[in-house]
Amino acid sequence: MQRRRKWLAASVTVTLAAVPLSFGVSSATAHATPRLLPESTVVRALSGTSTPATTDYCLAHSGGLKRCYVPSQLQAAYDVGPLFTAGDTGKGQTIVLIDCFGSPTIAHDLATFDATFSLPAPPHFTVITPAGRVPAFSANATDRVGWAVETSLDVEWAHAMAPDANIVLAETPTDEVEGVTGFPEILKAENYVVTHYPGSIVSMSFGATEQTFGTWKKIVPFRAAFLAGTKKNVTFVSGTGDTGSSNYEVAMTLYPHPVIAWPASDPLVTAVGGTKLSLDDAGVRVAPDAVWNDSRPGSPSASGGGVSSYFSRPTFQSSVAGVVGVHRGVPDVTMSGSCTGLVNIYLGISTTSSPAGWYSVCGTSESSPLFAGIVALADQRATHALGNINPALYAMSTTPNNGLVPVTVGNNTVSVSSPAGILTVPGYSASATYNLATGLGTIDAALFVPALVTASAQLASAHHAHN
């Protein structure tokens, strides 16, 4: 199946609309290796492509429904300023973004993004192709264009949150799946990263519904890098998906019952859901954060969350057993991802209908690299890589001044189209405690980073004392 994708024409009379970038799987291969599903949604900036869209402009030309953001606004919203002032900017850390195909213009795109928003260039920006050479780019291939958008989003916004961290882009040569490509190639890239970049933070803005693997045994081989990486203090983070309580099955249809995606569901991965931020031009909240849910009847556009069908409840979630039951629950945390609170990216590729320039983007593809940047700040503060942070996240959740901010508004219930009509897929509601829509909540980085460092140190000390 080809990825279905649409660019909106730039016009002040056009209302912003969200169109998912998605992959499907053919019925013949649904239980071999599922096709990857990039977790992002892309819309054209209402202001055109020559300049990034401002919050005021998007509000004025979307009937007051949509806001568009630049780095300084999200930096303010997540309170990274005190960390930057203290020198915690990600220096000495490495963030790895894994993207199928990548983008042939990413170095130029990042440089343009940095120049526009007065960000320093990363100390080192490296593009690697450990699973094989990426084929020549084609602007006529919708999957190639879509992954280029994904790449710009991942690289630019991870860098915005940790401007002095090294950035590594690991490109893989295809997203096709016939049992020998797709996830196996991503595994090759991940294994290379674990070996050559120990202690890094790896952000994954892709996923596939657990059930499309067919059985638990089909997932097991693809976990090898997580198992090896955890031993080398690599932190893995992943977006939870953009279709709320549902997700894709064969032939690009959506499950009519609650499901979640892997790798976000893996206990060795920190699952990052999406919220709706309502900010003014200075990044000050004008409304409380809410679960990202911009869905329309039969058209899901919301943060993924729920319980795993394959993974049992990990020990670190024992404190929330009353919510997750006997299964792994996601998300763990949430950050910006809503399509009514978009972020600007610069995209250097050009197609016949979409010139190079500025675009507005949303989805948990945004949430994951944002959080990866925050972890880089924590690694610098700790002076060493924190590795798998999930145990520390849940341990610190009951301590004061932990920087975990509850998100108490909204839910991720969606509806899907089916032969029987529009069906509701029940989701989960936000609350002041752990829940399956927003996890432990969102973050105040100035408090969260030191609290995470302290909790990690306490767990490490307890582990060493026990052994």
Image (cartoon, rainbow, N blue to C red):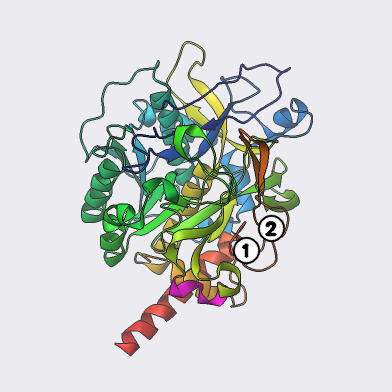
In the figure, 316 relative to 7: above or below?
A: below
Left/right placement of residue 40 relative to residue 36 reads right
In this view, the residue in front, 208 or 437, is: 208
Residue 46 tag number: none
- Classify mark 1: residues with Cα within 10 Å, few (<14), some (14-19) or many (20+): many
Check disc 1 and give the amino acid type: Asn
Q: Which residue is mark 1?
A: 435
Residue stretch rendered in magenta on the structure: 314-320
Q: Residue furthest top?
A: 352
Is the residue under label 2 in contact with that under label 1 (CB below 8 Å)? yes
- The majority secondary structure of the magenta stretch comes to helix
Q: Where does label 2 land, which residue?
A: 429
Q: Is residue 99 left or right of residue 363?
A: left
On whether residue 91 falls in the magenta region, the answer is: no
Q: Position of residue 45 (x, y in %)?
A: 61, 25
Query: Which of the 4 quarters of the picture holds residue 294?
Result: top right
